[in-house]
Amino acid sequence: MGSHLSTTVAEGLAFMNLIDGKPVDALSGARIDVACPSDGKVFASIPASGAADVDRAVKAARRAFDSGPWSRMPAVERGRCLTRLFQLVEKHGDELAALESRDTGKPVRQGRADVTATMRYYEFYGGAGDKIHGDTIPFLPGYTALTLREPHGVVAGIIPWNYPLQILARVAGAALAMGNTLVVKPAEDASLSAIRIAELALEAGIPEGVFNVITGYGRDAGAALSAHPGVDYVTFTGSPMTGTAIQQAAAVNNRGVTMELGGKSPQIVFADADIEAALPVLVNAIIQNGGQTCSAGSRILIEKPVYEQIATALAERFSKLTAGPHEADLDLGALINPKQKERVAGFVAAAEEAGIPVLARGQVAADAPAGGWYFAPALFGAVDPKAALAQEEVFGPVLSLFPFEGEEQAVALANDTEFGLVASVWTRDGARQHRVAKRVRAGQVFVNGYGAGGGIELPFGGFKKSGHGREKGFEALYDMSATKTIVFNHG
Ligand code: ADP
């Protein structure tokens, strides 16, 4: 099919929604400016969709689901479409990475890593959908009982701005593999790659109306989508507050939801750990994507005998970190928007005011454009475990250190937030690895390592305020489908 986008984004390009396979503007004609975080300059625009546009997209997805062929197609054929989408993402990888970096301000290296993960999602789910099957259940004499996994129907995917390509792929890969149709509402700050992927999906043979994208503000398009009675299931990644609003909206129709709501993830370093191996991982887990990562390792718990040693080594590394424009490919890029920069700066200022020691600050590159939304990384320690910095998700390049004494206190501190997304344990003691991994309340626990993002095969999701439901791996295919039980009375 002919693309309405050029392969490089022409200045001032007006992106469109993709509904029923067609590029369309919002019915109101209203638009949102798209600025690049690296210089703050507007370079494109997206539709500011409202309830009427949402209704149009949901109806298209409903028709596509109800009339087939997508939902009735053998799973292997749906899988082949996803495999073709994987190949198209690979073919257009440079273009997608450049688009993503420009739209979000992330270093081009990170944009390319996101493309690689995105390919892997479509590849994984391209091969996984036909491996899901139900059970036969021993039941009463004279009966045969079996289960099928059926798609929910129309799935609404509300996507955040931190990893737009990847998070769309984890939603779309699993939802489409199971035969659902989709209405995606990307974040108003980072919608461009979603539009491009929906176009490539058409080229991959995914029928019109199956993969719809509407852009717009959360309070308008997002709210209308989560409350739409034509939506059968809602999946959301973003902040806990917005997650609550979306669940309340979906509850009006009693629809199921998957919620991935971020974290305050601890890395626990015991005195017997391989500290040299841990150091680069500890830094990367908070600096990757400028700390704007749900699974960012934002708390480091350090056993007292090695606290000073690790704090000093981290401070040395932090003081060398530099933020700059995405093309410069430095340690980190700009933050997504001025609001986010203000929020992160607010946490840092409050911590300084409360007397929490700043162990090191990184810097902003001297030649970074003045209009960009840069924030120099900050390292704090020792942080009071009750401080806002210890309890709230900053979503920026801010790392907090906490000393502890012994395993009991380590576990207690690790679990002493409302979140429970990811954790890691650094120790050479095998029995302790098992004990601590089991006692930490987190959806993913790494031992002597840390994986922020990536790991397509690994089920991912939270305990407590970090949300519910599981994404990635085979688990996502269960989230994106429902069990139907069929009972035959054959006497
Ligand atoms: P942020 O606060 O950084 O903008 P959010 O978690 O609010 O992060 O945003 C994640 C996604 O949720 C975006 O696509 C956004 O448009 C959407 N969103 C925001 N508010 C609402 C809402 N009330 N209902 C539905 N979606 C929303």
Image: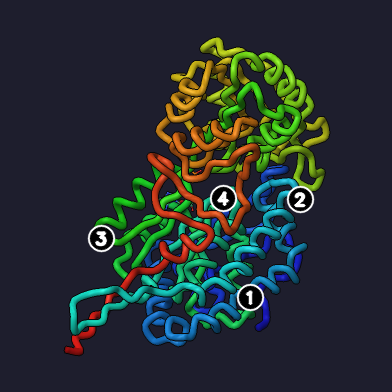
**Residue at position x 56%, y 69% from top?**
125
Q: Report crowding for label 3: few under 14, some 14 to 19, many 20 or more residues within 10 A (C-alpha).
A: some
- For marks 1 and 3, give the CA distance: 34 Å
Q: Position of residue 391 (x, y in %)?
A: 46, 27
Give residue 424's quadrant in the image: top right
Vertical position of residue 364 compared to residue 38: above or below: above
**Residue at position x 61%, y 12% from top?**
357
The residue mark sitting in front, 4 or 1, is 1
- For marks 2 and 3, give the CA distance: 42 Å
Tell me the residue that label 4 is attached to. 161
Tell me if 8 is positioned left or right of 475 in this view: right
Tell me the residue that label 1 is attached to. 83
Does mark 3 have its CB less than 8 Å from ligand 1? no
Tell me if 365 is positioned left or right of 425 in this view: right
Q: Report crowding for label 1: few under 14, some 14 to 19, many 20 or more residues within 10 A (C-alpha).
A: many
State which tag comes first along the sequence, 4 or 1. Answer: 1
Question: Quick one: SS at disc 4?
Answer: loop
Amino acid under label 3?
Asn
- In the rendered structure, find residue 108 and report the number of the disc placed on it: 2
Tell me the residue that label 3 is attached to. 254
State which tag comes first along the sequence, 2 or 3. Answer: 2
Amino acid under label 4?
Trp
